[in-house]
Amino acid sequence: MRVTDLAVRPTKGATPERVMEISCDPESGVIGDHGTSRRRQITLLSAEQWQTACTEVGCDVAWTTRRANLFISGGEFTEKHSGKRFRIGEVLIHIHGELVPCQQMEDQQLGLLSALQPDWRGGLHGEIIESGTIRPGDTVELIG
């Protein structure tokens, strides 16, 4: 799997802004992103699962609508990833679980909420364990 695109939301409720790199650290999470909890410092979305959801709703919706930080291509996320660690670029991330879609997805596109609910299509959330920078093209390596 590889990082395809990156985004941050500088303030709560802001439209996600695509960026060329993301800096991360265990204390702050994604630098420049709005407040996060310790267990939900960074969010990951599979390009393949996003496309499946878009196909179900019958239109292409920008991935940033999901409000995730990392758009990952080359694989799908499942419950087997919960509790695992990913090395992405210089950053080590501990995955805590599924990024459960909310009503805002339905507000953005009719049917999107239900299209994201099965099979962990909504993505993953995790905690930064080791600081570093993530850029498009970086490999996503499952550590265990």
Image: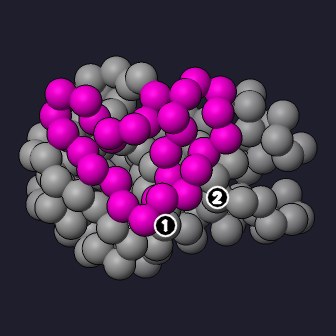
Check disc 1 and report the residue beneath it: 5
Q: Neighbour class for label 1 at 10 Å: few (<14), some, many (≥20)? A: many
The quadrant of the picture occupied by the C terminus is: bottom left
Counting from the top left corner in percent of width and height, residue 91 is at: 17, 55
Q: Is mark 2 on a helix, strand or loop?
A: helix
- Decide if residue 55 is on the left or right side of residue 72: right
Q: What element carries label 1?
A: strand
- Decide if residue 31 is on the left or right side of residue 117: left
Determine the residue positioned at 10% across, 46% down.
Answer: 130
Q: Main secondary structure of the magenta part?
A: loop
Q: Neighbour class for label 2 at 10 Å: few (<14), some, many (≥20)? A: some
Check disc 2 and report the residue beneath it: 63
Choose between 15 and 39: the one closer to the eye: 15
Mark 2 is on which residue type?
A: Trp
* Relative height, residue 79 to residue 96 (above, below): below
C-alpha gap between disc 2 and disc 1: 9 Å
Comes first in the chain, label 2 or label 1: 1
Q: Give the range drawn in magenta.
A: 6-34
Counting from the top left corner in percent of width and height, residue 127 is at: 24, 36
Residue 87 in sight in this render:
no
* Relative height, residue 125 to residue 115 (above, below): above
Labelled pair 2, 1 in contact (Cβ < 8 Å): yes
